[in-house]
Image (cartoon, rainbow, N blue to C red):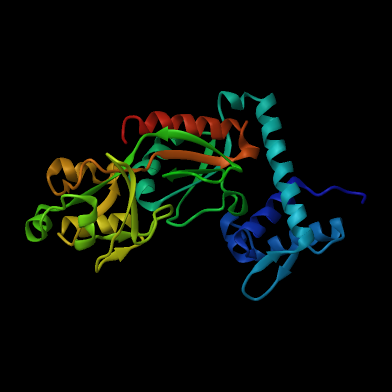
Amino acid sequence: MNNLPSMEDLRLFCMVVNKQSFAASALEIGVSKALISKRIAVLESMLQARLLHRTTRQVLATETGHIVYQWAQRILTDAEQMAEEISSSKIAPRGLLRVCTSSGFGRNHVSRAVSAMAQRYPELEFQLELLDRPVDLIREGFDLDIRIGAVHDQSLITKLIARNARVLCASSTYLEQRGTPACLADLVQHKCIVIRERDQEFGRWKLEGPDGVEMVRINGPLSANNGEIAHQWAIAGHGIILRSMWDVGPSLKRGDLKRVLPDYQQDANVWAVYPSRLSTSAKVRVCVQFLEEWLATTV
């Protein structure tokens, strides 16, 4: 092999693998699909191996492609961190930071934090994606995930950046019509608004109370995969919700909602989650620290 792959071709290859599409990759960086295809062909020729399976619907890495993808990520990260070590980027971080979080928390908190961060660090570029589904950070190419609730993946680095809890609440209208539950078991007789959002279990609430952790099965005529919609339904009197204080706090203060069974709550702390390969990344470190300081005044 007379030549080595270029960093840009490796970066393009990783993007195609993550997006499983030439067209989506081309759209992402504002070039033609033909150019992406040409650069991948150059990379395959240089490595003398087929790296991608191409179909009419998607593009998938071959077995060899998976090996190249893992090495490419390592090479790109190492090159970036080398630049950080020998430049002023420890003081003024630079480069693209891909961040994901859930839609409600992203719109209400993370987006505003990113706006402020972009003003403080003009050499940083941010790509924020709001996703109400489990995210594979490594496969999807994200640098940082801001998650609500427990993190169970031991292959990722986690840092607690804000304390938070989910609480039970309902509108006065609903409670006047259906009564107020006196114990956790009473929830079975109530209309509960079910949310399926990232770490939340569907149709079952696990709460911590005076006797430790308890489980209750719940049901109701309304369910959604978006917590903000469920929040509005609760205000409209459709039932009881289990929702983060960062979301329902203002509604509780205004009296639009009232706490139900206040001795019970569910842990929903805010965590910064990122791949171990970025453990020394200046831009990730700066972002996590900024978010921790920002959320301390807003959550």
How many marks overall?
0
Residue 163 drawn at (x, y percent): 36, 34
Q: Nearer the viewer, residue 234 or 291?
A: 234
Q: Nearer the viewer, residue 25 or 286?
A: 286
Query: Do we see residue 170 in this rendering?
Result: yes
Where residue 43 sits, quadrant-wise, is bottom right
Where 114 sits versus 34, above or below?
above
Residue 113 drawn at (x, y percent): 39, 37
**Which quadrant: the C terminus?**
top left
Residue 32 drawn at (x, y percent): 64, 63
Residue lying furthest front: 211
Where residue 239 sits, quadrant-wise, is bottom left
Where 103 sits versus 81, above or below?
below
| Residue beneath the point at 39% across and 34% down | 162
| Residue beneath the point at 88% across and 49% down | 3
Q: Nearer the viewer, residue 259 or 131?
A: 259
| Residue beneath the point at 37% across and 59% down | 196
> Is residue 119 shown left or right of residue 154?
left
Query: Do we see residue 191 in this rendering?
Result: no
Residue lying furthest right: 2
Where 3 sits versus 30, above or below?
above
> Is residue 283 shown left or right of residue 231?
right
